[in-house]
Structures are given as C-alpha cells and as structure tokens.
C-alpha cells in the first residue's frame, strides 16, 4: 500500500504551493485504489480527505430576501443592497448546481470522477449509482408558496426524459424528505373522503368546476371504499378542476375571494379558508387556490419531518427546512407557479391515495443525534443538537456523507482533515466513506448540524 502524504504536505496541496498542483487532496499515489478481480478495494482503508465545500445557491422567486433567508445566511452571500430571493442551497453533485471544493473551486462531481468513486463513495455505492452522490442535500427558505407539483417514479422519469429532455432533464426519480428547521407549512396528499364531501358541500366555487356528475359520485362514496371506484371519481373531479378554462378559474377564484371576505365579518374562517386567501394574494386567479381544498394542510414543528414519495401531490407553503432527495430535479407542476405547467401529466400520474401523511420525528441513534430514515434507499438525514462543551463521534459508514453546520461553532476532527477543522455556521463538509468524524461544540451556544448520507438500510 502506498504511504499517505504528511499533514503538512496535504496542507501545502490545499494552499496551492507551486510544484504540488494546488489540489485539496493527497498525492495520487496516496489515494490510489486497486481493485481485485473479485471487486474488493485493496486500499479501502487508505486515508481520504474530509473536504470543505461551497454549496450552490438558487435564487427562485419564492425564496426569502437576504435579511430573512436562512439560505442567504448560510451561504454568506450578498450585501445590504441585494434584493434577490435566496431560495435553496444545494449540496451535492447534481450537474445543474454541483457543490465545489472551497479551496480550489473545482466541482465535487469532477473531483470524484477524477479521483475514482469506489474508494470515496464506497464500493457498494459506486456499484449501484456510479460516480455521483445518490442524494442531493438542500436548505430551503420558503417565503411564498411553491408550485403544486409531484415527482415521477423511476419508470415515468425515464419516459418523460426521453420524450421531453429539455423540460425533464433527469431520468431519475425524486423521492424527498423535508426536516423542519422552523415552523413549516405544506400541502401534501389528498384529503379524506369525508373532508372532500365537506368541501363539495361548503365551497360552491370548487363544486362548480368539478362538475355536477363527478360531485354526485364523490358525495355518494363511502369513507372506507378505498378502492378503484373512489380513486377514479377523485381523479375525474380533480382533472376537471385543473383543466378548467382560465376564464372559468378566474371567475371562480374571484367569487371565492369575495364570499370569504364577506363571511369573515360574521364568522371565523377555517384555517384552510385563511390559507386559500393567502394563496390568492400570492397567485391571483390561479387554479392552485381552488386546488388547495383537495389537499391535506400539514404543519411541522422544528425537528419534525415529512416524506414525499413518487407521484404524490404537494406544495411547500412557508418556513425553512433541510431537504434530502434522490439526485434529480424532475418536477411536474400544475398550479401556483409562473413556470411551465404540465397539467395532463400531473393529473394522470398521481396515486390519488387519500390519507394524512405520516409525520416523522426521527429515531435517537446516540446522545444528541436523531436519525430520519425514509423508505428510499438513496438517503437519510441525521440531526445533531450539541450543547457547548460536549462532543459526539459519528462512526464510519460504508458510504459518503455531507455535513452542514446550521448554527453555532466548534470543531470537526477526522484523521484526514487538511486543516484545523474549525466549524461555524454555514460550513459544509464532504466526508468520504469509512471515515470517523468527531464533532466538538465550543461556542457560547449549542451547535446544530445536519448530516445527509446513503440510507443505512441499503448496507444491511
């Protein structure tokens, strides 16, 4: 086995001292991985560096402005005159916005490809997903509602990409999980049969667009039918609403707004009614205002999480969260957005399941660390709340991880750190497979970190 470079020569590489290539890595000889005919990494225990990363910021219109956006604070971008919205911070290898090495500016995706993914990502991960991270890690600052949307399953993702690659740029599915950092609001999944009946009884504007025939079918459905019949009625009703003409929708939204404003003077509006008035202010005359009545209104407290599987309708409404997903940016939209709407695809792809989504609260895996484990094999998320003066050791795992310091300060220790490991708010680290990491909180307050990695069940 080739010997590792010394800590001083690694640091020289990081600082770009002439003659050493200016790379934030040990010499190639130190990091070379040899593979036997059986596929075993002979150098699987070689030391690979923990890298500081710079995430990529997305300035979507629904994001918070600099002074109120967690994304802006973590990214450390902009000045007092910056009026751009700061919506998302991406951490991963997705080609639309790959993270880069903080020291050199080289993209993490290119660096992994050049170094050889098997040793850095782990043999099983590289064999399953190639040279990319299988997960995309994000922070979201939601100031305005995102679109009513769904993400295709793997088969549909491949079909959409083949048919319309300019719109659907990935051939991968996109299951995702949001962990609330602040109070977080979302629409997710279809309401129960009983609640839908209440909507048809009390919201004439929705009943009109659904159509008399479909309304009668739904009103006659039983709560526990649960079969193809109810789903087909729901699909027909929802499709009628979403495909109504722009003029019809505009008139219906106007009537709804006027009626609720009048009724608010004599009664307290329901939370859903208050929500749709808020949505109407953000997206006037939009069919999504009416569609909101079809969906569960979900409220997450900090530390609670929501998993969204393939072909399930949802819309994030407000708040800040960390989000992890399979590496994909495929989104099928149909309302509450100025972007391209693919209404027919969305209406045809949905599962039309009617149940309130499960709220995930995580599982304690050791002191100060809670793990959120979704059904998807590509990812999981750890949340670490570390009091000042305390430390925690994250055991080696056979896959890669990305660590984000959300608040506080302290130190990251690993055998392969290229610097002193100081960690503060907004710092992002790439941790290769089989690397033990020790985290120490040293600031005046607690340190809050998040780790994204491959789902531990994948390795079982």
Image (spheres, rainbow, N blue to C red):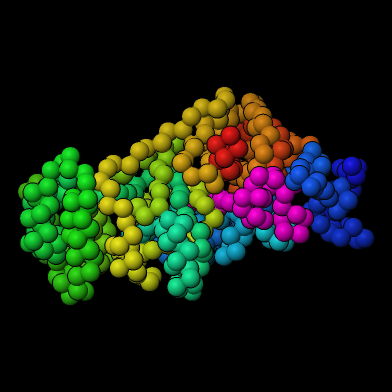
Identify which residue is drawn at 29% across, 62% down.
347
Establish if 25 lies above or below 356.
Answer: below
Residue 129 % position (x, y): 61, 53
Establish if 238 lies above or below 124.
Answer: below
* Residue 195 image-quadrant placement: top left
Identify which residue is drawn at 26% across, 62% down.
288
411 or 34, which is in the foreground?
Answer: 34
Judged from this view, the residue extending furthest toward the right is 19
Span shown in magenta: 112-140
Establish if 329 lies above or below 196.
Answer: below
267 or 83, which is in the foreground?
Answer: 267
Question: Quadrant where the N terminus lies?
Answer: top right
Magenta stretch: includes residue 454 = no
Question: Quadrant where the C terminus lies?
Answer: top right
In the displayed structure image, the side of residue 257 where residue 135 appears, left or right: right
Residue 434 % position (x, y): 71, 38
Residue 77 % position (x, y): 58, 59
258 or 20, which is in the foreground?
Answer: 20
């Amino acid at each position: 086995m080739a010997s590792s470079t010394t800590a001083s020569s690694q640091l020289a590489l990081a600082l770009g001292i002439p003659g050493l290539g200016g790379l934030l890595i040990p010499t190639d000889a130190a990091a070379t991985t040899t593979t036997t005919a059986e596929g075993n990494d002979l150098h699987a225990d070689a030391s690979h560096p923990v890298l500081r990363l710079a995430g990529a910021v997305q300035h979507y219109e629904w994001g918070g402005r600099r002074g109120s956006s967690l994304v802006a604070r973590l990214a450390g971008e902009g000045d007092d005159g910056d009026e751009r919205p700061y919506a998302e911070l991406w951490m991963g290898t997705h080609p639309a916005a790959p993270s880069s090495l903080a020291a050199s500016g080289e993209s993490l995706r290119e660096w992994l490809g050049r170094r050889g993914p098997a040793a850095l990502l782990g043999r099983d991960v590289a064999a399953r997903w190639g040279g990319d991270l299988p997960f995309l890690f994000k922070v979201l600052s939601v100031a305005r509602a995102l679109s009513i949307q769904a993400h295709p399953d793997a088969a549909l993702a491949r079909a959409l990409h083949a048919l319309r690659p300019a719109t659907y740029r990935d051939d991968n599915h996109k299951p995702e999980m949001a962990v609330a950092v602040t109070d977080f609001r979302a629409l997710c999944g279809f309401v129960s049969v009983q609640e839908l009946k209440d909507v048809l009884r009390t919201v004439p504007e929705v009943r009109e667009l659904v159509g008399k025939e479909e309304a009668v079918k739904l009103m006659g459905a039983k709560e526990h039918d649960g079969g193809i019949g109810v789903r087909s009625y729901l699909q027909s009703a929802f499709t009628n609403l979403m495909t109504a003409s722009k003029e019809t929708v505009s008139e219906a939204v106007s009537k709804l707004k006027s009626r609720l404003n009048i009724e608010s003077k004599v009664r307290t509006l329901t939370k859903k009614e208050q929500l749709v008035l808020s949505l109407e202010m953000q997206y006037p005359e939009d069919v999504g205002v009416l569609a909101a009545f079809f969906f569960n209104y979900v409220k997450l407290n900090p530390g609670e999480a929501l998993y969204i599987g393939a072909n399930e309708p949802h819309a994030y409404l407000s708040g800040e969260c960390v989000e992890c997903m399979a590496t994909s940016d495929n989104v099928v939209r149909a309302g509450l957005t100025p972007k391209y709407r693919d209404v027919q695809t969305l209406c045809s792809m949905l599962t039309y399941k009617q149940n309130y989504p499960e709220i995930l609260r995580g599982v304690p895996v050791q002191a100060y660390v809670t793990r959120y484990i979704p059904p998807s094999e590509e990812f999981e998320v750890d949340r670490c709340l570390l009091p000042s003066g305390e430390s925690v050791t994250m055991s080696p795992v056979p896959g890669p991880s990305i660590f984000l310091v959300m608040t506080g300060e302290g130190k990251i220790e690993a055998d392969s750190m290229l610097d002193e490991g100081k960690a503060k708010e907004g710092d992002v680290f790439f941790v290769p497979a089989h690397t033990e990491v020790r985290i120490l909180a040293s600031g005046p307050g607690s340190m809050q970190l998040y780790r994204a990695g491959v789902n531990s069940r994948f390795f079982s």
